């Protein structure tokens, strides 16, 4: 799930209000988590892989995750969720995800894609006419969010939101590694062809979403890093440019700041999408190559 579901779903939920008119996952008892620890000069930095949408059955979390939060004085997310409002989310995604007046989706996708959409949209309670201003990549995200919620996965149960609520309640310092505008612009860099391909791959993958999500959550709960890499970072092998946009470029931008956290005198918990942490080019292995001792918890 590329763009933070927590942010995008906030906008999607607003849209769905208008569009609406037209196997059990339990906490694992395994010993490992998708959580890593770095000993800094005077502090500890925790790196927690997030799943941005979860079912209720994913809770309670493993104790190690809560301890990392409890021991940290600062919590860092992909974006500072305290700066996210329905107004600025709407502004940013309308700016990047909508065609300008006079342009329509039908003009930018092939007849084959249009035919698939005309068959799929009614199944999700969405009309063909209501999505004509949406760019293909944005429509793909909307459909994914709609489907994910329909099968019981919710952004307000995601790890980001869970720990943000706790941080706010306990008055812990909160910050982001990038801005809402950064996130809104990620997929807007696609060409028309790439955007349509992204939409087509989403449409063909929807029937398997429920099963795949459950496998992802179970692997995440068990700290199965190699499996998570295979599930979340297929784009690295299938579409290097897409992988660079969604993961590699953002990882490279975040790394200096994450390294800087190891020089603080306060413990820091960094919570980002699991796909950013795992794999040979993920944040964890890159930090190890740079000489950091990173321990999986």
Image (tube, rainbow, N blue to C red):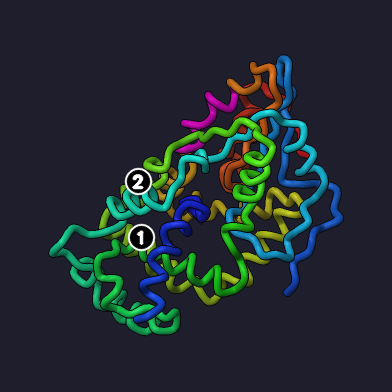
Element at label 2: helix
Report the side of 116 relative to 54 (left or right): left
Image height of 201 relative to 246, above or below? below
Which residue is depicted at the point 61% across and 30% down? 173
Q: In front here: 78 or 32? A: 78
Q: Residue furthest left?
A: 102
Element at label 1: helix
Specify the label residue 185 is tagged with: 2
Q: Badge 2 local density, few (<14 within 10 Å), some, or many (20+)?
A: some
Q: Earlier in the sequence, mark 1 or mark 2?
A: 1
- Give the magenta-colored segment's residue range: 249-259
Residue 112 falls inside the magenta stretch: no
Residue 116 showing in the rendered view: no
Report the predominant secondary structure element of the magenta stretch: helix
Image height of 201 relative to 93, above or below? below
Q: Which image quarter is the C terminus in?
A: top right
Label 1, label 2: how many angstroms apart (C-alpha)? 11 Å
Quarter location, residue 284: top right
Residue that label 1 marks: 137
Residue 255 falls inside the magenta stretch: yes
Find residue 154 and report its horizontal and vertical position in percent: 59, 63
Which residue is depicted at the point 49% across and 32% down? 252
Find residue 131 and report its horizontal and vertical position in percent: 30, 71
């Amino acid at each position: 799930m590329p763009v933070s579901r927590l942010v995008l779903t906030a906008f999607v939920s607003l849209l769905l209000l208008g569009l609406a008119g037209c196997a059990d996952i339990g906490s694992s008892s395994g010993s490992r988590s998708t959580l890593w620890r770095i000993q800094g000069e005077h502090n500890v930095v925790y790196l927690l892989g997030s799943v941005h949408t979860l079912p209720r059955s994913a809770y309670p979390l493993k104790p190690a995750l809560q301890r990392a939060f409890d021991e940290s004085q600062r919590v860092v997310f992909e974006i500072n969720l305290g700066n996210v409002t329905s107004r600025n989310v709407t502004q940013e995604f309308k700016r990047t995800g909508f065609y300008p007046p006079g342009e329509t989706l039908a003009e930018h996708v092939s007849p084959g894609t249009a035919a698939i959409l005309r068959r799929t949209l009614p199944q999700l309670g969405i009309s063909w006419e209501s999505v004509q201003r949406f760019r293909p990549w944005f429509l793909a995200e909307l459909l994914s969010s709609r489907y994910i919620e329909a099968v019981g996965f919710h952004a307000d149960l995601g790890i980001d939101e869970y720990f943000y609520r706790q941080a706010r309640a306990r008055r812990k310092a909160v910050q982001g590694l990038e801005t809402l505008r950064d996130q809104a612009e990620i997929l807007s860099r696609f060409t028309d062809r790439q955007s349509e391909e992204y939409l087509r791959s989403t449409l063909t993958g929807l029937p398997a979403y429920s099963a795949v999500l459950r496998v992802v959550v179970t692997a995440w709960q068990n700290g199965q890093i190699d499996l998570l890499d295979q599930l979340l970072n297929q784009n690295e092998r299938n579409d290097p440019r897409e992988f660079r946009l969604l993961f590699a470029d953002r990882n490279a931008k975040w790394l200096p700041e994450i390294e800087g956290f190891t020089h603080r005198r306060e413990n820091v918990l960094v919570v980002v999408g699991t796909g950013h942490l795992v794999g040979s080019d993920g944040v964890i292995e890159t930090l190890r190559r740079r000489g950091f001792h990173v321990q999986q918890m």
